[in-house]
Amino acid sequence: MPDSVTITDNRTGESVEVPIVNGGIDADHWNKLLPGIWFLDPGFGSTASTESAITELDGANGILRYRGYPIEQLAEQSTFLEVCYLLLNGELPDKSQLDQWTHDITHHTFIHENMRKRFYEGFHYDAHPMGMLVSAIAALSTFYPEAKDIEDRENRFIQINRLISKVPTLAAMAYRASIGMPFVFPDNNLTYAENFLSMMWRVAEPSYEPDPVLARAMDVLFMLHADHEQNCSTTAMRVIGSAHADPYSAAAGATAGLYGPRHGGANEAVIQMLRDIGSYDDIPAFIESVKAGEGRLMGFGHRVYKAYDPRARIVKNQADEVFKITGRNPLLDIALKLEEIALSDDYFKSRNLYPNVDFYTGLIYQAMNFPMDMFTVLFAIGRMPGWLSHWNEAVDQGVRISRPRQVYTGPAERNYVPISER
């Protein structure tokens, strides 16, 4: 007998047997038995909004795979652009495919002069880089009106290429504008990560050569953030895309979702927590305050993972390599002690409070001189191929426009009262 569940309407005695397929059940069966009765699930904690072949996430066992490939193998052996190709196309590229893909990305990094000269100058002098990035991504749709033809698959991939190519340029421009520095043009002789670092930090050098260890760390961090199933921003991308919005508009909406401190801003909260603790000697008092409900252990626990986040181990190893180049972050000792306590203390173990990817990323970014305002911007660069893969998959699936239902809790019908009688 196939796996199934049986739902019975106790008001009528009618039942329906619903098959379980790939760990889910089809809501149409529920609707046939209980029309007009909605499954109330705030936050979508138990609701699958789509079928997807892109990312497999098993939070109970700490597993993350892109198109079937374990994240640990990709982080050790692959590159960000190869991972982009994998997410978008479903398979790893051969050498000629990767060479062509890398060439196409490398040679589409420049931005229209109107954006460089006029658009960014319109922001206030201390505008947040993430706010500028959201606006800039949306503005790209006005430069490429053909992007609205989403039924043309070849055209879709031209826009996908442009977004992955240009978002590091837009991000670096946002940072430079926020500190009053002149923009740096892309350098086609550099890799994806190297080029971004060049646009960020180059001042007056004839050429900029990033440290290979730092460039590799940047590339790995982009890979780790490339996709993470149906999180807030990815769901926003698919929902906006279901209205057949162009990919620039959908990506701007996804970036806005990432801007929220409960999503993309978690590593900033970790840095702030470590600063608030202040010193190694103050850790015991902080731990006790957390247990008393007077504080929060930031960077531990995850909405999906109930085991050690596999990305956190990779990030921790990258942190070790980065600190050999930049020097040891003074907050690292506090972070390591917090991790040691959380992994050994029954209070935290019983609550599945294991380190997540955000716990160490902020320390790496800070060691590489990125200001905290740029942390979510870096996240957005890495997540762009995942958003676009989901957008493209949804278009291929021909999904209906997203239209969740609600359970109404307001007043029943009532008659209008003229203002003179209220």
Image (tube, helix red, strand yellow):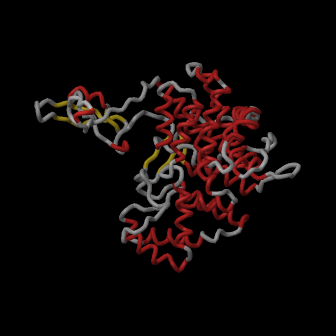
Foreground: 289 or 355?
289
Residue 369 seen anywhere in this rendered image of the structure: yes
Above or below — where is 123 with respect to 52? below
Residue 21 horizontal/vertical position (percent): 34, 34
Position of 62 with respect to 126 (left or right) is left
Position of 160 with respect to 11 (left or right) is right
Quarter residue 412 falls in:
top left
Quarter residue 403 falls in:
top left
Q: Residue at x 25, y 28 (%)?
A: 31
Q: Residue at x 40, y 53 (%)?
A: 60
Above or below — where is 342 with respect to 10? below
Residue that extends furthest to the front in the rendered view of this protein: 420
Residue 1 horizontal/vertical position (percent): 24, 34
Above or below — where is 265 with respect to 159? below
Foreground: 68 or 202?
202
Quarter of the image for the C terminus: give it: top left
Residue 318 horizontal/vertical position (percent): 64, 59
Q: Residue at x 86, y 49 (%)?
A: 207
Position of 5 with respect to 151 (left or right) is left
Residue 331 horizontal/vertical position (percent): 60, 70
Total tally of numbered discs in the picture: 0
Residue 109 seen anywhere in this rendered image of the structure: no
Residue that extends furthest to the bottom in the rendered view of this protein: 281
Residue that extends furthest to the right in the rendered view of this protein: 206
Q: Residue at x 67, y 49 (%)?
A: 219
